[in-house]
Image (cartoon, rainbow, N blue to C red):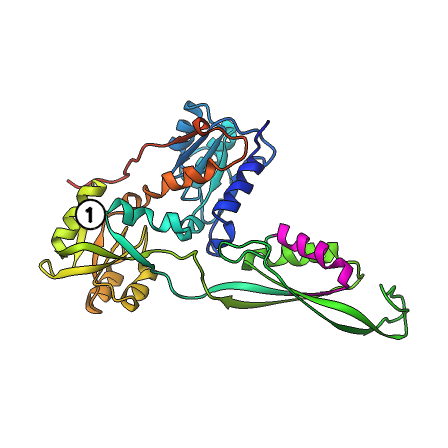
Amino acid sequence: MTVTVADLLRALDERIPFAWAEPWDKVGLLAGAPDRAVTTVLVSLDATRESVARTVSVGASVLVTHHPAFRDPPERIVAGPGAAGVLFAALDSGVALVAAHTNLDRDPLGAEALPEALGMLPFSPLESDSQPCLHVAVFCPPAAVDDVAAAMERAGAGRVGRYADCAFAAPGEGRYRGLAGSTPFSGAAGEATRTAEVRLEMVCPLKAGAAVAEAAAAAHPYEEPLIVTSETTMRRGAARMGRLCRLPEPATLDALAADVGTRLGVRPRVWGEASVSVTTVAVATGSAASMVPHALAGGAEVLVCGELRYHDALDAVSAGLAVVEAGHDATEWPLVPVLAEAVRTTPGLAGRDVVIDEPRMSWHVV
């Protein structure tokens, strides 16, 4: 059985849905061909020229990373530093680049990877706000509902948390009058027509809206199907960033920071009163400014994260939330084994063909 990049992408989307990612995020296949055969996969934190070289050195054809190779696509793909150089190196070496970023951050196993590494006991997701999405309503004859729904699902609609193919269908009566030159599915041009229709409703990520609407139109038997999209929000379910945790026993802020540093192999930066006793900890990977309000709302006394900007840290401390910054990469390397396990769910891909990169920090303290 030949495993392709497309097979790997389907497995990742099933296990860590790309629909969970932020609208601005770059996830999925970023460079390479979907029909290319997968030999070995290297799973790492960052897509760099060095990690591309390591991919080649282990005989792999795909580099799957947590961080995407770019946030804003480069104007030119040329050899050299930066994202352009990474893309050039990957394409030149025949290495496909795949990323699972904020969707992995929201995966329940991904969100609990750092608390587990820190020996903390998570009891609740940290992120609590609603997620933006598109609501898509399509009016179609009853016989076409299944085909239209399947087409919309393939284009990215119908994913709600851990559930797929989610839709609502309600019967009703459609009314229309075809104008001159029209060829109505039911009735004739010029006459008022009433016919049985079903209102089919699904949600999808903002950036999938155009593709979902086009897919619905292509599968619809009407020449002018009514497809209505509206931007809205929906409650987040299991897919939420960060965790609220309890310590096994109370500790001072400095003792907690020292333990975090020992477990992650770093020297954290600490904001707050050194001797204050803490029991409830908000844990978030990477940049965590957006998590500060959630940590405060959840009753956390300290936020353990990768980093905060200076004024964000000042504001957090003034609001009563201490901060322990352990470094962006140090807090996200625990996600890499979770990502590797998701890659291993690809049908036909042997476990030995998934190689986990060794953790490495891009900074140090002297």
Residue at 72% from the left image edge and 59% from the top image edge? 145
Query: Residue 364 placed where, x, y %?
Result: 21, 40
Examine the rendered structure and indicate whether residue 340 appears above or below residue 220.
above
Query: Residue 76 placed where, x, y %?
Result: 51, 41
Q: Residue furthest left?
A: 275
Question: Which corner quadrant holds the N terminus?
Answer: top right
Dot 1 corresponds to which residue? 260
Residue at 81% from the left image edge and 73% from the top image edge? 176
Question: Which corner quadrant holds the C terminus?
Answer: top left
Residue 243 as seen in the image, left or right of residue 155? left
Query: Residue 9 placed where, x, y %?
Result: 54, 41
Residue at 41% from the left image edge and 27% from the top image edge? 53
Query: Magenta includes 132?
Result: no
Please name the predominant secondary structure of the magenta segment in the image: helix
Query: Magenta includes 144?
Result: yes
Q: Nearer the viewer, residue 80 or 277?
A: 277
Q: Across the whole image, how many numbered discs are drawn on residues? A: 1
State the SS at label 1.
helix
Q: Nearer the viewer, residue 329 or 12?
A: 12
Confirm whether residue 247 shows in the render: yes
